[in-house]
Image (cartoon, helix red, strand yellow):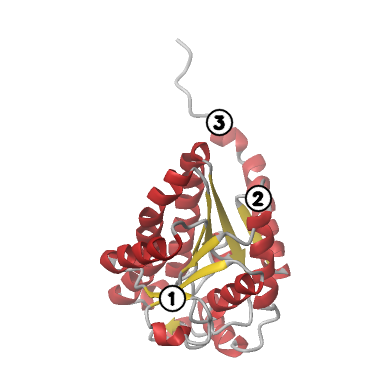
Amino acid sequence: MSGRVWFITGASSGFGRVLAETVLARGEKVVATARDTSALEGLKTFTARLDVTDPASVEAAVSAAIAEYGRIDVLVNNAGRGLVGALEELTDEQARQVLETNVFGVLNVTRAVLPHLRAQRSGHIVQLSSVGGVVGNPGHALYATSKFALEGMSEALAGEVAPLGIRVSLVEPGPFRTDFAGRSMTFSEPIDDYRDTPAGVMRQRFSAQDGVQPNDPAKAAEAIVTLVDTPDAPLRLPLGPEAVSRIRAKLEQQLADLAAWEEVSLDTRYPDD
């Protein structure tokens, strides 16, 4: 697959950077993008400035990629923002920044790339979601909102583009040793009442885990490459033991609730005439 062209957003650090390095080491082509292209120095590949929240910037980066390579085979929507804080603590600006990047940013890039994938009748869109896109944790309400939206958008998109030869996959990582919990994370101004609640514990946990997360981003990158290499790739791929266990527990609880409340759920019809 040495002829494949990968278009990766947020490639300056974290998953994006490691994935770009992994793909390049395999002899494939990468368009590495970031808001600050100086942060992409050291990657021996084609780079483009890209602010996913700016449609003009998105169109320019995609056009530059097509001009350079003539095609895009794999789109990786990796750029994202984190936000920790109880819902009441969050400002409008913080909430909108997360949604603009994690939802509308993905929408902008995906819509710009799709015409080229449609013309090829091939391609794979990889969406970097999170275990937080399946399990909503206290202290992570707006981040979960953005990732739940991404999950729904991508599930619907997969059905829309499958007849056109285009695949869609969601990657749902747990805690990996990137800078996500450090300089990439925004924290709300705390309200004291939440200090000892689950939302407050989440704040403390994120601050404490930066740099000591148990999972290796290089292994995540290899898993993403394996996913893209697989013709019948799944819609969802959790990554890390924490993600697998928490998603399994969520699904098991949903099935148990469905069974326990099935009689109530089904009793909605008009009486027979």
Q: Amino acid at mark 2?
A: Ala
Classify mark 1: residues with Cα within 10 Å, few (<14), some (14-19) or many (20+): many
Q: Which mark is residue 135?
A: none
Of callouts 1 and 2, the N-terminal one:
1
Q: CA distance from mark 1 to mark 3?
A: 54 Å
Image point (51%, 36%), residue name: 163
Task: Name the residue carrying label 2.
Answer: 233
Name the element at disc 1: strand
Kindly indicate whether the residue at mark 2 contacts the one at mark 1 (C-beta within 8 angstroms). Answer: no
Disc 2 crowd, CA 10 A, few/some/many (<14, 14-19, 20+): some
- Residue situated in front as seen by the camera: 71 or 134: 71
Residue 47: mark: 1
Marking on residue 266: 3
Q: Secondary structure at mark 3?
A: helix
Residue flagged by tag 3: what amino acid is it? Leu
16 vs 185, nearest the viewer: 16
> Please, what is the three-letter code of the amino acid marked with disc 1?
Thr
Q: Estimate how packed mark 3 is, as few (under 14), some (14 to 19) or many (20 or more) residues with alpha carbons within 10 Å.
A: few
Quarter holding residue 100? bottom left
Horizontal and vertical percent for residue 60?
Answer: 31, 66
Q: Position of residue 76 (x, y in %)?
A: 51, 63
**Residue at the left extreme of this rendering:** 56
Name the residue at 28% across, 64% down.
Answer: 55
Residue 227 place in picture, x, y as percent:
66, 57
